[in-house]
Amino acid sequence: MRTLSVSLSEQDYKKYGISSKEMSFDLLIEKIKNVIARDALEKCQSVAKKSGLSKMTIDEINSEIEAARNAESNT
């Protein structure tokens, strides 16, 4: 196995929740993926809130899904 040294800013160290000076590459990738996923979710929630989608009821959501499926099967 080889060792790779990576330099991170203090801000990134905190952002990715790194608590030790050594970790596996797989764990580093997982931490980065988690932050990217969280950021994407927060952006989606923001868009939903701005557009009013976050106020949809479960029945409205299910109706939209059914309409999309019906439209898809009719093409």
Image: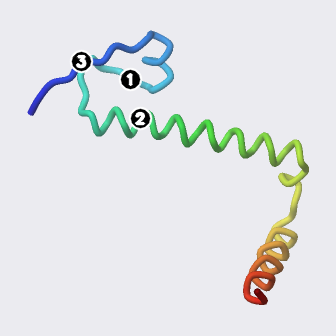
Q: Do the residues bearing badges 2 and 1 touch, measured as CB atoms within 8 Å?
A: yes
31 relative to 51 in the view: left or right: left
As drawn, 56 above or below 5 = below
Q: Amino acid at mark 1?
A: Ile
The amino acid marked with disc number 3 is Ser
What residue is disc 2 on? 31
Q: Secondary structure at mark 2?
A: helix
Q: Nearer the viewer, mark 3 or mark 1?
A: 3
Residue count near mark 2 (Cα–Cα under 10 Å), binned few <14, some 14–19, many ≥20: some
Mark 2 vs mark 1, CA separation in Å: 8 Å
The amino acid type found where label 2 is placed reads Lys
Residue 72 in percent (x, y) is at: 74, 82
Q: Is residue 16 above or below residue 27?
A: above
Labelled disc at residue 1 = none
Which numbered tag is attached to residue 5?
Answer: 3
State the residue at coordinates (30%, 18%): 6
